Amino acid sequence: MSDFKIAPSILSADFARLGEEVENVLKAGADIVHFDVMDNHYVPNLTIGPMVCKALRNHGITAPIDVHLMVKPVDRMIADFIAAGATYITFHPEASEHIDRSLQMIRDGGCKSGLVFNPATPLHYLDYVMDKVDMILLMSVNPGFGGQSFIPGTLDKLRDVRKLIDESGQDIRLEVDGGVGVANIAEIAAAGADTFVAGSAIFNTDNYEETIAAMRVELAK
Ligand code: DX5
Ligand code: ZN
């Protein structure tokens, strides 16, 4: 597969220089901007919301923005992120009372929809909505913070989801988020992922371009 996408998580960027950081990481070869939204309720941390997404658009960022909602409830934020210029909007199914409706809201708003699975969240939430998702995001850490270690059991889960996607015959991206870096990206790709979120592995290095290039070298192996 050659359609690999690298999605730096701006959670690890310097928020005091966010516009510049996003520009730099895109210039360095990133494909997608991963935008982590935390509410200090669904997850024990508080980050950024639709105003910041809108500000990035107003700053001239045209790359896809992949909004990962770690909030409960989800519907109000879906509406606000559609208006703020999101490209993808994904949410955790256990944080929505009406999963089908929330997915539909995202597509009706012209965005791409997706569900996110924590390491221990079962995949059965997908059973009746495979035709309503454009992306499936597997968390390889428990959500809330950057810089955690990749949970190895995610590899088996990735293989399971890859099979589900292939059997569905649909065009669904398989994204993985948490503890992804140059050292393990090839193994994660081999398990079936095609979209790679990396926060600390990119933003904590001095040269984003070199780091992203090193990831692509691994992906080409
Ligand atoms: C965690 C977030 C991730 C996080 C990844 O809750 O969803 O996107 O920023 O950070 P790293 O790549 O440092 O594990
Ligand atoms: Zn994320």
Image (spheres, helix red, strand yellow):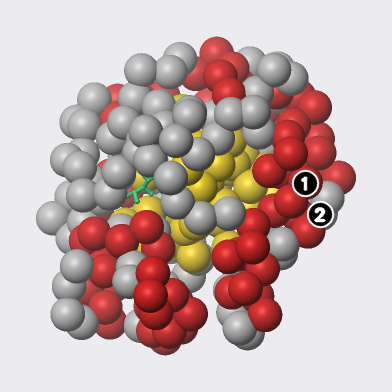
| Residue pointed to by mark 2 | 110
Structural distance between the alpha carbons of marks 2 and 1: 11 Å
Q: Which mark is residue 96?
A: none
Q: Residues within 10 Å of mark 2 (few under 14, many from 20)?
A: some
Q: Residue at x 20, y 42 (%)?
A: 148
Amino acid on which disc 1 is placed: Ala
Q: Residue at x 66, y 33 (%)?
A: 74
| Left or right side of 140 for 32 | right
| Left or right side of 156 for 4 | right
Q: Residue at x 44, y 35 (%)?
A: 40
| Residue pointed to by mark 1 | 79
Secondary structure under tag 2 reads loop
Q: Earlier in the sequence, mark 2 or mark 1?
A: 1
Q: Is residue 210 above or below residue 45?
A: below
Residue 198 at what x, y percent from top left? 31, 57
Q: Can residue 139 be seen at all in this image of the molecule?
A: no
Q: Can residue 78 be seen at all in this image of the molecule?
A: yes
Quadrant containing the N terminus is bottom left
Quadrant containing the C terminus is bottom left
Q: Nearer the viewer, residue 10 or 157?
A: 10
Residue 141 at what x, y percent from top left? 28, 35
Amino acid on which disc 2 is placed: Gly
Residue 101 at what x, y percent from top left? 80, 27
